[in-house]
Image (cartoon, rainbow, N blue to C red):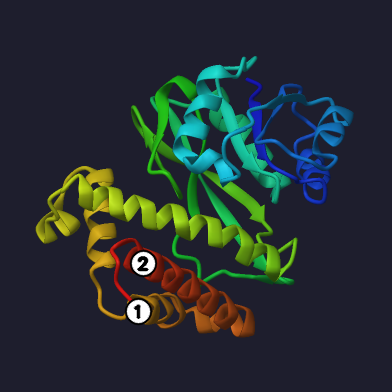
Amino acid sequence: MPVSVLVLTKNEQNDLPACLESVSWCDDIHVLDSGSTDDTCDIARRFGAKFVIRAYPNTTKIFGGDEAAHRNWSLKNTAFRYPWVLLLDADERVTDDLRAAVLTAVDSPGGHVAFRIQRRDFLGGTWLKHVQATPFYLRLFRPEKLHYERVVNPVSIADGPVGIVRGYLDHFPFSKGIAHWFERHNSYSTMEARQIAQNRRDRVAFSLRKAFTAADFHERRFHQKELFYRIPFRPLAKFCILYFGKLGFLDGHAGFQYAMLQSIYEYMIVLKVRESQGMS
């Protein structure tokens, strides 16, 4: 059974060609754009992809300020030709092994409504094999059986059993340089701080017990997130978890650099939450 492909973009003229080339075997490619001002549109159409713009005229925030809403809109409003969808970012590449595994999975999904895919993040020429917080992402799914929650780094929630497909999805988050990474994560940290503030306004009760014992994965993940938000010296803790706990030092200098960048990102969130609460 064939599969549809959905690529999310904004000003991705540098990365999009290689991404689309990696899925050239697909005859139903959709590019959902957030208002690019470069050649993203022309590139998508040159590769034969269907190009849809969902712009946000009243804000310059990435995804309009709500990534989950943006993704949910795409699943409800895109006319996919096939029942299964493979979701990609422009800086990701589908390897040959993953292509074969995806087509096999959708041909015989069993009772699964979605599948997780193992992603390889690269910094320079180094695969960040150890320092990643998690290498598995839910990217292959029946669109009517999936939705997203959280305004940034959204949680993928499947309405049914989830499996795993073999093969790698290669990711190049630093392809546009460190300055772009900081610019993007400055936006992400603002949205993350907003999510934390919203959780506290809603007075969602935190449970240490549920962080470790909740039967539902997403409920457990929520309370683990809240636990992490309460850890003293959280940026330092993030570095130690990634560099020592996840054995990031085995990734060499790239592992150290990545762990440092993630701790800086965490500190940006801490500062913005404090600022929103009127704290110095």
User: Could you say whether the residue bearing mark 2 is in a helix, strand or loop?
Assistant: helix
Q: Quadrant of residue 160?
A: top left
Q: Residue 49: x and y, percent?
A: 78, 26
Q: Which mark is residue 66?
A: none
> How many other residues sit within 10 Å of disc 2, few (<14), some (14-19) or many (≥20)?
few
Q: Check the image and report above or below for 47 versus 206.
A: above
User: Could you say whether the residue bearing mark 1 is in a helix, strand or loop?
Assistant: helix
Q: Residue at x 30, y 66 (%)?
A: 278
Q: Residue 133: x and y, percent?
A: 44, 64
- The residue that mark 1 highlights is 237
Q: In which quarter of the image is residue 242?
A: bottom left
- The residue that mark 2 highlights is 275
Q: Residue 83: x and y, percent?
A: 55, 18
Q: In which quarter of the image is residue 150?
A: top left
**Where is the C terminus found, in terms of image quarters?**
bottom left
**Where is the N terminus found, in terms of image quarters?**
top right
Q: Which residue is drawn at 54% across and 74% down?
A: 261
Q: Residue at x 56, y 69 (%)?
A: 129
Sequence-wise first label, 2 or 1: 1
Q: Which residue is drawn at 47% across and 60% down?
A: 189
The amino acid type, in three-letter code, at marker 1 is Ala
> How many other residues sit within 10 Å of disc 1, few (<14), some (14-19) or many (≥20)?
some
Q: Name the one closer to the observer, 232 or 237.
A: 232
Residue 280 makes an appearance in the image:
yes
* Position of residue 85 in the picture relative to residue 163 (left or right): right
The amino acid type, in three-letter code, at marker 2 is Glu
Q: Do the residues labelled 2 and 1 touch (CB within 8 Å)?
A: no
Q: Check the image and report above or below for 94 versus 206.
A: above
The label nearer to you, 2 versus 1, is: 2
* Position of residue 212 in the picture relative to residue 155 (left or right): left
Residue 135 makes an appearance in the image:
no
